[in-house]
Image: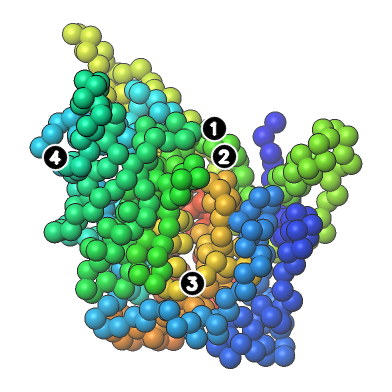
Amino acid sequence: MACQHQTVHIDSSPTAASEGIVPPPIARRQAATRPSGRATGNTDDHASLESLFPPPLVLPDDGLINECDEPPQTLRSWISLKERNAITRRQQTIYVVPPPTDDSVSPFFCSLMRHWARSVAEPAKIRCDPPPVETIRDYLEAFYHPLPVKLLPETPKFVHWEDNDDDDNTKKNTRPGPPQYIGLQIKNNLTRITTRDTPDQQFPRQLQLNDLLDAAIAALPRDAYAMVMLTHHDLYEDDDDDFCCGRAYGGSRVAVVSTARYTPVLDKHMGVDREHTWPLSHCEEYVRRKCWEDAAAASELPSSLLPEPTPTVLTVNATTDAKSPFANVLRSAIALPSPTPLRPRPPPNIPTDGIVTPSTYATATSDFANYWLARVVLTASHEVGHCFGFAHCVFYACAMQATGSILEDLRQPPYLCLVCEAKLGRAVRSASNLVGTGKGDGDEKEWLVRRYEKLVAFCERKGMREVRMFAAYRNWLMQRIAVVKGDSVEL
């Protein structure tokens, strides 16, 4: 029987306590949002703001466990960060680099690059197109309002690298293996990209992430505040990595994000629980079960011999508690079905010659494609945040949290918490006159409402409201707009 998500977990998990991760007191949380670094003395107003900002879940093996010794970055410490890049009249644009094409004079090389970007788990008779780069740009433009977000005019190209000749294979008259290096050309810059076999064999070949970041640095436009490069190929960072989905060199203002591992085609292999991605990652039954399974593994006892997990105190009923803002967010997700699996359906008309082309088969359903999109924009907005100097967040569940796995990626929220939102507001509102956003963007409330409204408009696009994350995000945004305006909310 499918989980009913009846109870919302609005606190950190039992794992957090066992790992010694204790949320800071409310006075410190309030102080973290203020330029002075001091609390006001009356925290009641801040407590009411936190109704839509639960603390991080911290489930077993989450990234926050490994980074709990890092000092938290408050608004005050971010302001004083020497490495932080300021938005200027000359450098104010965020660029999105489209995934490299395989435009080459060699048909074999073109075919090879396309082959490397296709998951071995992808059904052969179904097209699973990755998210359109224009839609990713649109999301980032709303997320980082009011900064302009543009596509890089020059599309990168993968090209053959000349130093791949293997003398030993030539002497032995044996067939050469896949190229160890390929070239990435962006404008007039050509960078060597190292490749390797994929350890878990889910893709034919991986590209070296740091090489791609070097290529991005070399191609950074003069008017860029930040730049994020997209790729459909699987990546790795270190020799010990299985894969890596993204990374930013914040001080250099560049980031790279791969769409490869976020395809729902790989969900079974990656162990993704589609029923409990955000916001349903805050389902009480799910949180208890994950902590219980971890305790069983640590004790080397079957879960049947462990005592039943104790319900937590800080929960609300997701179906009956109309006064809980975060329960409202979950209800908007519960009302939608899980994404449908990809299955080829018989072609409507079999050609008389019996030849069936790829276009004859069904493409991915819109909810499937938009679930993929939801995952990619989360990581893209996170990595661009590092270019603003944002460190990993420890105060709340937040888009800037550290993540240690694909599973954790999908449990995290798309929104910035109160602390990180204050940093973004400080950065972009001070630049509002530079980017010509018009009267009012210098005011914090006005900027918040405009930013939220742009994100709501994105979440209301065709097909988006059928995706759990976007539907729940819209609900969350509408409630935040009401809080900022002091109005009642209409969902």
CB under 8 Å between discs 3 and 4: no
Residue located beneath label 1 in the image: 268
CB under 8 Å between discs 1 and 2: yes
Q: Quadrant of residue 127?
A: top left
- Cα distance, mark 3 to mark 1? 33 Å
Residue located beneath label 2 in the image: 272
Depth order, front residue of 187/39: 187
* Residue 339 as seen in the image, left or right of residue 103: right
* Residue 323 as seen in the image, left or right of residue 132: right
- Judge the density around disc 1: few (<14), some (14-19), many (≥20) Cα neighbours within 10 Å: few
Residue 482 at least partly seen:
no
Q: Amino acid at mark 2?
A: Val
Q: Residue furthest top?
A: 353
Which residue appears at 78% of the width and 43% of the height? Answer: 298
- Cα distance, mark 3 to mark 2? 28 Å
Which residue appears at 57% of the width and 52% of the height? Answer: 404
Q: Amino acid at mark 3?
A: Phe
Q: Name which of mark 3 and mark 1 comes first in the sequence.
A: 1
Residue located beneath label 4 in the image: 104
Residue located beneath label 3 in the image: 390
Q: Residue furthest left?
A: 105
